[in-house]
């Protein structure tokens, strides 16, 4: 199929693909909100271990899994005329770990805590690395089936819907984590069914199964997207592809500086993964008391996704990343000063806005540096460049929290994040607005 035919098919199905992928992403985010790696997963580690350094394993696995496979997957993606078949296969392994985790925690909750924690990390690692394998074809898939001038609003609406659904998910999580029946006595007529309280870790098992159910629905919408075949790049050995990374970085200094700034920002934002553990330790919170944190994060993220997506298409994706980084660092600094748990509601509102902008621009800024033919290579390089930070950063952060406490960790990460923000603002010349790109 030639480029003109592919373009006509994309234009004819533009609205359909937009809606289907908004629904896919929204339901996927709903699933993840039920087992949030910023609130629920730190709770699992805190209750099963309590070791501060282990909190660093959550962002380490999440980021390493997402970023590391990029360079090895990119040449395989570029050589295919369609991204969807590879994406649908890879994302299955991204979703099934939550089914297994849910069944494990419900059917074998009395296993030793160390065994449960090990199995949790193994399953989370499978999910994270599968997400990294699926990430390259997914990003390029979206850049093909969604018109370029709508990338910002698409990611904004998709994540915004996920955030809105996630607020409901946070309410459900709070009900399931609470040590009392729902609804409370007097709400229902006598004899009506109630949700009986469950002990830990069965509560997390229920949330994991609900997560998987949402992901099954999202998969159906993803599979229904129309993607015409388009011109493929010549087949390339992984070794040859890797040897081309150096020349690519040499001829594009602004992309190179963007990667440096992005690494520093990513390291700074690691502080968000330690906020729940810090609040649990400092104020002795109960399990169900983290639910408002999740709700605040997701409500903020839903609103910010819509606003920042719209703003990025008009003001610029780089500028939105600078703003998001500033909000993220403010959240971390406030955690140092917080005198009461109530402060963490405001902190997680800032976290939601910061993460919305960071995720949005993580996709769209890479698109803006490359032509359609080069896009898989740029995505792969951008993702893999973060891998050293993803691997070493959380472990070093966990070690620093162990020896110096959470406040020292937050101050150090805040300084690093601000340095990254300055490099991005003054050192990167990225397009202010995204223009439509012909399929290629």
Image: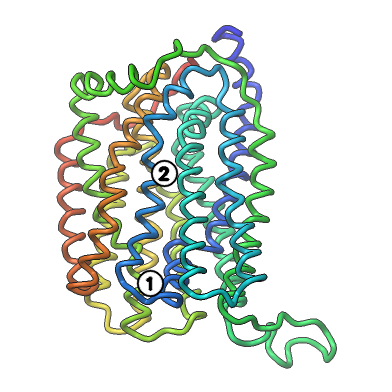
- Name the foreground residue: 114 vs 30: 114
Regarding residue 392, the answer to whether it shows in the image is yes
Residue sitting at 25 percent across and 49 percent down?
265
Is residue 227 rendered to the left or right of residue 77?
Answer: right
Is residue 433 rendered to the left or right of residue 174?
Answer: left
Is 346 drawn above or below residue 210 in the view shown?
below
Q: Secondary structure at mark 2?
A: helix
> Do the CB atoms of the residues marked 1 and 2 lie less than 8 Å apart?
no
Is 398 drawn above or below residue 2 in the view shown?
below
Residue sitting at 65 percent across and 62 percent down?
210
Question: In front: mark 1 or mark 2?
Answer: 2
Is 24 drawn above or below residue 213 in the view shown?
above
Quick one: label 2, few (<14), some, or many (20+) residues within 10 Å? many
Q: Quadrant of the N terminus?
A: top right
- Residue pushed farthest top? 2
**Residue 141: x percent and y percent?**
53, 29
Residue sitting at 30 percent across and 67 percent down?
53
Q: How is the image coloured?
A: rainbow
Q: Secondary structure at mark 1?
A: helix
Q: Which residue is mark 2?
A: 66
Is residue 372 rendered to the left or right of residue 206?
Answer: left
- Residue pushed farthest right? 191
Regarding residue 298, the answer to whether it shows in the image is no
- Name the foreground residue: 61 vs 147: 61
**Residue 70: x percent and y percent?**
39, 34
**Residue 71: x percent and y percent?**
37, 30
Pick whichever of labels 1 and 2 is earlier in the sequence: 2
**Residue 404: x percent and y percent?**
17, 73
- Inter-mark Cα distance, 1 to 2: 22 Å
Q: Which residue is mark 1?
A: 276
Is residue 328 rendered to the left or right of residue 172?
Answer: left
Residue sitting at 48 percent across and 28 percent down?
140
């Amino acid at each position: 199929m030639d480029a003109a035919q592919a373009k006509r098919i994309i234009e004819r199905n533009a609205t359909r693909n937009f809606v289907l992928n908004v629904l896919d992403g929204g339901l996927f985010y709903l699933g993840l909100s039920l087992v949030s790696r910023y609130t629920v997963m730190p709770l699992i580690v805190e209750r099963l271990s309590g070791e501060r350094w282990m909190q660093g394993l959550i962002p380490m696995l999440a980021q390493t899994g997402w970023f590391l496979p990029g360079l090895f997957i990119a040449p395989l993606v570029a050589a295919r005329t369609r991204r969807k078949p590879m994406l649908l296969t890879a994302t299955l392994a991204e979703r099934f770990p939550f089914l297994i985790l849910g069944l494990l925690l419900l059917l074998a909750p009395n296993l030793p805590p160390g065994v449960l924690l090990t199995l949790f990390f193994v399953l989370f690692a499978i999910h994270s690395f599968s997400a990294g394998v699926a990430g390259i074809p997914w990003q390029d898939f979206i850049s093909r089936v969604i018109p370029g001038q709508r990338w910002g609003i698409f990611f904004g609406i998709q994540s915004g819907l996920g955030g809105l659904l996630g607020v409901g998910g946070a309410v459900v999580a709070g009900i399931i984590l609470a040590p009392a029946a729902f609804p409370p006595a007097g709400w229902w007529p006598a004899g009506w069914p109630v949700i009986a309280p469950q002990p830990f870790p069965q509560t997390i098992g229920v949330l994991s199964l609900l997560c998987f159910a949402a992901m099954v629905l999202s998969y159906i919408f993803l599979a229904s997207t129309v993607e015409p075949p388009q011109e493929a790049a010549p087949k390339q050995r992984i070794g040859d592809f890797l040897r081309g990374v150096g020349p690519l970085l040499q001829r594009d200094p602004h992309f190179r500086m963007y990667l440096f700034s992005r690494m520093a920002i990513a390291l700074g934002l690691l502080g968000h993964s330690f906020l729940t553990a810090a609040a649990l330790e400092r104020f002795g919170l109960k399990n169900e008391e983290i639910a408002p944190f999740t709700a605040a994060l997701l409500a903020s993220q839903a609103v910010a996704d819509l606003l920042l997506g719209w703003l990025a298409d008009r003001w610029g994706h780089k500028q939105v990343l600078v703003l998001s980084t500033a909000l993220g660092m403010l959240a971390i600094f406030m955690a140092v000063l917080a005198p009461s748990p109530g402060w963490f509601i405001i902190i997680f509102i800032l976290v939601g806005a910061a993460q919305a902008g960071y995720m949005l621009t993580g996709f769209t800024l890479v698109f803006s540096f490359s032509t359609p033919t080069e896009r898989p290579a740029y995505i792969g390089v951008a993702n893999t460049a973060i891998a050293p930070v993803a691997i070493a950063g959380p472990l070093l952060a966990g070690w620093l929290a162990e020896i110096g406490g959470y406040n020292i960790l937050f101050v150090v990460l805040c300084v690093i994040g601000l340095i990254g923000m300055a490099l991005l603002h003054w050192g990167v010349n990225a397009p202010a607005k995204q223009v439509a790109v012909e399929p290629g």
